[in-house]
Image (spheres, grey):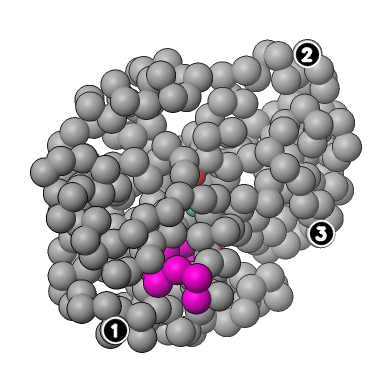
């Protein structure tokens, strides 16, 4: 049995299709036991050995983990769900304090790269839970990820009534315009030694995860129907998010992004080096 740590946001829903729907959910449950949590905790569980396979932030990859090919949580333009909200009169270049959602690892590092490498500033990041009004009452800016970011975008007027006018930056777009590369948040990663004892071959694992993603992408309308009662977002926004904002393929450009992101993060002392990407 492989213990799987998955992310409890809307964006991974297509990746999880076969694990949650007939006809494959029951046979897959004989080999995989799933557990849903925040991205930072997925990484923590995988790295501490409490999980064997995780959908984890690329900031948390280590040389001991193997990336499963084919699937990713990425974006080719605007992602919507990674927002850096800057309280006016501040701008990107004057921000000094940033409340950062503790659920995040990758977006936090992308923001640190944006400031240290591209803007040459050095703001402080203060860990906070995902409450935009409480965050922006304490700091010049806030980083929100996942469903809380999507929901904050819907209640932008209400948030700005409480804290004053803000500028909203999409961190995927900020990366993309500066590097001409896709933005990548998360990948499936496995502890190879756990796989060796699980009776699942690397080829089978790759096939199960890839098929699940492929089937999910052919069921977007079903996912929109299932998620509409679960999250306070209009169905059109959910559909658009799953079809246009998120890119689910770990293609060569995404691998290049992971390299460059880790190189920049190492140079700026944000993350430990990861000179080679280890694939399953
Ligand atoms: C696109 C997203 O990417 C997420 C952001 C992550 C991070 O910042 O560490 C990790 C995993 C992803 O689920 C999102 O949830 O909004």
Q: Residues within 10 Å of mark 3 (few under 14, many from 20)?
A: some
What's the residue at 15%, 55% (across, down)? 27
- Which residue has dot 2 on it? 161
The one nearer the camera, 252 or 126, is 126
Query: Does label 1 point to a residue whose CB lies under 8 Å from ligand 1?
Result: no
Measure how far apart labels 3 and 2 are at the Cα level. Answer: 29 Å
In this view, the mark in front (3 or 2) = 2
- Which residue has dot 3 on it? 122
Q: Residues within 10 Å of mark 1 (few under 14, many from 20)?
A: few
Measure how far apart labels 3 and 1 are at the Cα level. Answer: 45 Å
**Range of magenta residues:** 49-59
What's the residue at 28%, 62% (across, down)? 32
Mark number for residue 197? 1
Residue at the far left in the pictured view = 23
- Can I make out residue 179 in this image? no
The one nearer the camera, 210 or 153, is 210
Q: Residues within 10 Å of mark 2 (few under 14, many from 20)?
A: few
Q: Secondary structure at mark 2?
A: helix
In this view, the mark in front (1 or 2) = 1
The one nearer the camera, 243 or 23, is 23
Q: Is residue 162 found left or right of 56 in the rendered image? A: right
């Amino acid at each position: 049995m492989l213990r799987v740590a998955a992310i409890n946001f809307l964006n991974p829903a297509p990746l999880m299709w076969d694990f949650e729907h007939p006809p494959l959910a029951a046979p897959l449950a004989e080999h995989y036991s799933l557990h849903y949590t925040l991205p930072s905790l997925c990484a923590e569980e995988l790295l501490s050995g409490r999980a064997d396979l995780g959908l984890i932030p690329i900031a948390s990859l280590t040389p001991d983990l193997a990336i499963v090919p084919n699937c990713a949580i990425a974006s080719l333009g605007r992602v919507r769900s990674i927002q850096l909200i800057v309280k006016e009169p501040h701008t990107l270049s004057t921000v000094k304090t940033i409340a950062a959602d503790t659920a995040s690892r990758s977006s936090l590092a992308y923001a640190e790269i944006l400031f240290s490498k591209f803007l040459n500033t050095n703001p402080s990041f203060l860990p906070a839970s995902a409450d935009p009004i409480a965050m922006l009452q304490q700091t010049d800016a806030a980083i929100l990820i996942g469903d809380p970011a999507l929901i904050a975008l819907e209640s932008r007027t209400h948030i700005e009534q409480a804290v004053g006018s803000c500028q909203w930056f999409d961190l995927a777009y900020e990366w993309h315009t500066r590097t001409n590369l896709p933005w990548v948040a998360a990948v499936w990663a496995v502890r190879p030694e756990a796989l060796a004892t699980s009776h699942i071959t690397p080829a089978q694992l790759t096939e199960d995860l890839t098929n699940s993603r492929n089937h999910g992408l052919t069921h977007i309308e079903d996912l929109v129907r299932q998620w509409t009662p679960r999250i306070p977002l209009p169905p059109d926004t959910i559909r658009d998010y799953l079809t246009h904002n998120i890119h689910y393929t770990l293609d060569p450009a995404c691998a290049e992004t992971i390299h460059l992101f880790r190189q920049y993060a190492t140079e700026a002392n944000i993350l430990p080096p990861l000179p080679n990407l280890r694939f399953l």
